[in-house]
Image (cartoon, grey):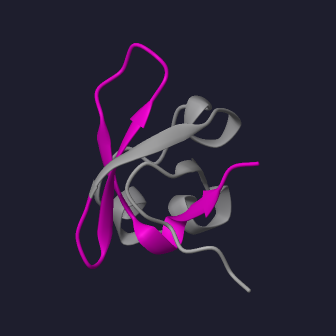
Amino acid sequence: MAVKIKKGTKIRAIREKLENSLEAKASDPRFPSYLFDSKGEILEMNEEYALVKFYTPTPNIWLRLDQLEIAE
């Protein structure tokens, strides 16, 4: 049974889905390593996106839900 991503869930970005995304093509495709190497927490959500806070001194970021996986 798959665990559903919800507010407060600890996540990590999926490199393959983020690097090949429309968002990457529309801006700088070089993503910082903390997106993939550290855990973030979902602060807010809508049907398609989640606002993620990473525990680094950086701004929060909106990512598509299909670009996220639950961090272990």
Residue in the foreground of this view, choosing between 42 and 33: 42
User: What residue sits 62% from the left and 32% below the top?
Assistant: 33
Quadrant of the image for the N terminus? bottom right
The answer to whether residue 7 is seen in the rendering is yes
Residue 2 x, y percent position in the rendering: 68, 81
Residue in the foreground of this view, choosing between 25 and 56: 56
Residue 8 x, y percent position in the rendering: 43, 48
Residue in the foreground of this view, choosing between 60 and 3: 3
From the viewer's perspective, is residue 2 above or below residue 12? below
Residue in the foreground of this view, choosing between 27 and 5: 5
- Number of numbered discs on residues: 0
Most extreme residue toward the bottom is 1
From the viewer's perspective, is residue 69 above or below residue 33? below
From the viewer's perspective, is residue 14 above or below residue 37? below
Residue 72 lies left or right of residue 36; in this view the side is right
Residue 70 x, y percent position in the rendering: 64, 58
Q: Quadrant of residue 58?
A: top left
Residue 61 x, y percent position in the rendering: 31, 42
The answer to whether residue 20 is seen in the rendering is no
User: What residue sits 41% from the left and 57% below the top?
Assistant: 24
User: What residue sits 26% from the left and 79% below the top?
Assistant: 47
Asked whether residue 35 is drawn in magenta, I would say no
| The residue stretch that appears in magenta | 45-72
Residue 43 lies left or right of residue 55; in this view the side is left
